Image: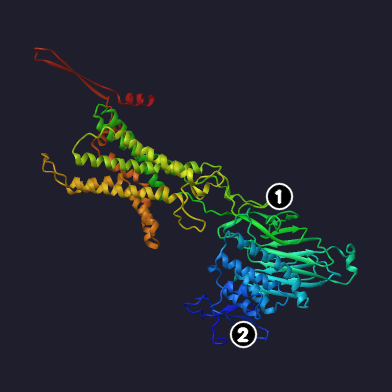
Amino acid sequence: MVASFWFPLTPIGLFAYSDKVCDDGTSNAGKPIASARCTNRTGRPRFEEPQILDCGQTLTDIQQNLTNSANIEALASNTQILTSVPQELTPDNITTAAQIVQTLLVSSNVTENVRLAAIATVSQLLSANETDDTKQNNATLGLTVTLDNLSVSLSLSLNTSASQVVQPNLVVQSAQIPAVNTQGVQFTSFSGTAGTFSANRIELNVNTTSVVVNEGSIPEALIFVRFPKEEAAVERATPSNVSLGFVLYQNDRFFRSRRYKRQRATIRVLSGTVQGPLVPQHLEMMFRPQMINGTSLYEFACVFWNYELNDWSTDGCSKGNTSDGFLRCFCNHTTNFAALWSFRENYEYAQALDWISTIGLCLSIAGLVVTIVHHLEYNFCKFSGDSKGSVKARVVLLCIYITLLAFIITFLSGVRNYSRQYEISTVPDRETNTVLLSEEYVEPDTGPCTAVTALLHFFLLASFLWNCVYGTQLVLLLRSLHSSLPPYWTKLSHAVGWGIPAVVTAITLAITYRADDPLGYRQEEFCWLAALDKAKRFDYRKPMFWGFLLPVGLILIYNIVLLVLTSMTTCKTNKNLQSTKHLSLRKKVLISFSVAVLLGLSWILGYLVLVTSGQPHLVFSVIFCICTTTQGFQIFILFTARTPSFRKNVSLSLQRLTEVNNELHGRTYHLWKNLKSMSTSETYRDLEDHYSKSLRR
């Protein structure tokens, strides 16, 4: 506790904000009421005297009072406290705060405390939400010029050889070095675990001939300024100092590019400024990209901020190697530098289907092939003269079998993505240094995976819709007690069964597919509709939801209604019927189960897989896998293997296979009309002759 305020544990050199906040009803309700800086000037860490916020003062009030206020230090501290929660700042707040800091830093009578509060405010603004507000972007970009000037003049104004201000998102380093015998200067920021800058991880080497990185240390950003050799520098004869300034930004929020599109990548910006008799020969930089989980480096570009273009430029810069994970850049001038980089996703490609899925799908293929052959032979060839209504009903069943078989064959042969460009190792091109257009590289579509996805989408939707048509047809026939269907039924059923899937598939492709970015439509791990966002979370905007799950969910709800109506009709006894044949309960249940299988209701388990986790998720996944992969085989058992016609055909086939043609013994009868006598003759064949003929065959 300091002056009745509680502050959290804070690293040395950084500011902390009190737990106590401004009261409700004030202009700054909910904002911390005090700030204090942790320091070790006395030998042990302690908080300095807290700065108290005026809870009724806004950023606009501070800006208006800057020119005529005697207590600039209080205004600087209030600005810092009011921006302590940067995520809550509006574009107007950020613009006003940036303008206040600009005024404070260029003031001729700025004190060290004012400078510290202003730089802390800039560090906080680097964590604010990014917007496309032009006024805000101009104000924050103007701060970068002010910080460059400050970095060069800071140590000179403090009359020290080196001065440093470190905040979580910003480092300002200043140094004065003698022009004589100076060969190079290296500024390095080493990585830590907190993800922020810390004074004990900032290093300045004022006289080195080359880049030096100690073994075991990992630099996040490094800049080496090489000066000409002593014999080539006439200016060295006059004793004088060279002023150097370095500014390191945690990100590029103040440098809003119109060309390079970034959403997830973190781009550090490192500024180097030199004033004095020496002109740098060249600058060498190293940046360690903060790779996003599940990604790898694809390409990078060495750039600087061109204030005339108001964007990144590559003029005067070239690239080095990246073999050790660092992005190396070389430039022949000083300014704000960065290494723009692009990444590509590392995908875990689908492995071969497990044995349960493979066996289930193979059984389904075999069952559907037999079912289709039997269906064509028995229901169309032998009964070609049946009524049109009967033929219509059989056509619907045939379409169900064909679409399901086509889906399974396509799935089994093509769901794995065999064109895996992302498995190919790529080394960034050192010769070409151009400004990148995006942070993420997506391989253009070159393989058949998109075509497989479209076919799977079409066949599966067609299978569900033909199931829907069959269920509707069944209910119409059962509840109306007629054997005929409406005259328009054939056209309507084909429009629904083939037309709607084709339209949905075409719309999905047209909206989400681009040849240069196919992953908006499909997945890379396997050939199916895209479902997840960049953070691997289910995204309702992806085609998996609105192009498949939503329409199939509606179809399943409709099919459940059809199943209920069918079961009610089957179980109910109609008094108008004269038949004395009654169905047993077992047969009624079997009929309902058969209809449920044909209507694809086992896919409801897939929705349960999506909404569950842990042990229930595993159980539903296994049951869903077994039920859906064997759906074709279930149809064969329920709709083909149990029919008398199929049993008869199987019986005849088995009889032909087991039939033995016995020619070893023969008997001849001779009959004469009106005669009571009868004679017979018998012949026998030698067994050896029989076997010898069989062998010759």
Find numbered disc 1 in the image and state the secondary structure of the residue it sits on.
Answer: loop
Q: Which mark is residue 515?
A: none
| Pointer 1 local density, CA inside 10 Å: few below 14, some 14–19, many at least 20 | few
Residue 195 in view in this figure: no
Kind of residue indicated by mark 2: Glu
Q: From mark 1 to mark 2, how far is it between C-alphas?
A: 54 Å
152 horizontally vs 16: left or right: right
**Residue ID at (37%, 40%):** 366
In the rendered image, the vertical position of residue 125 relative to residue 315, given as above or below? below
Number of numbered discs overlaid on the protein picture: 2
**Between 505 and 610, the one nearer to me in the picture:** 505
Where is residue 632 shown, x and y percent of the image?
Answer: 34, 43
Q: Which of 572 and 619 is in front in this view?
A: 572
Foreground: 338 or 651? 338
Amino acid type, residue under disc 1 in the picture: Thr
Kindly indicate whether the residue at mark 2 contacts the one at mark 1 (C-beta within 8 angstroms): no
Which quadrant of the figure has residue 289? bottom right
| Label of residue 432 in the image | 1
Q: Is residue 409 visible?
A: yes
Q: Whole-percent x and y of residue 368? A: 35, 39
Marking on residue 49 = 2
Percent x, y of residue 227: 82, 64
Residue at 78% across / 75% down in the picture? Answer: 156
Residue 505, above or below 79: above
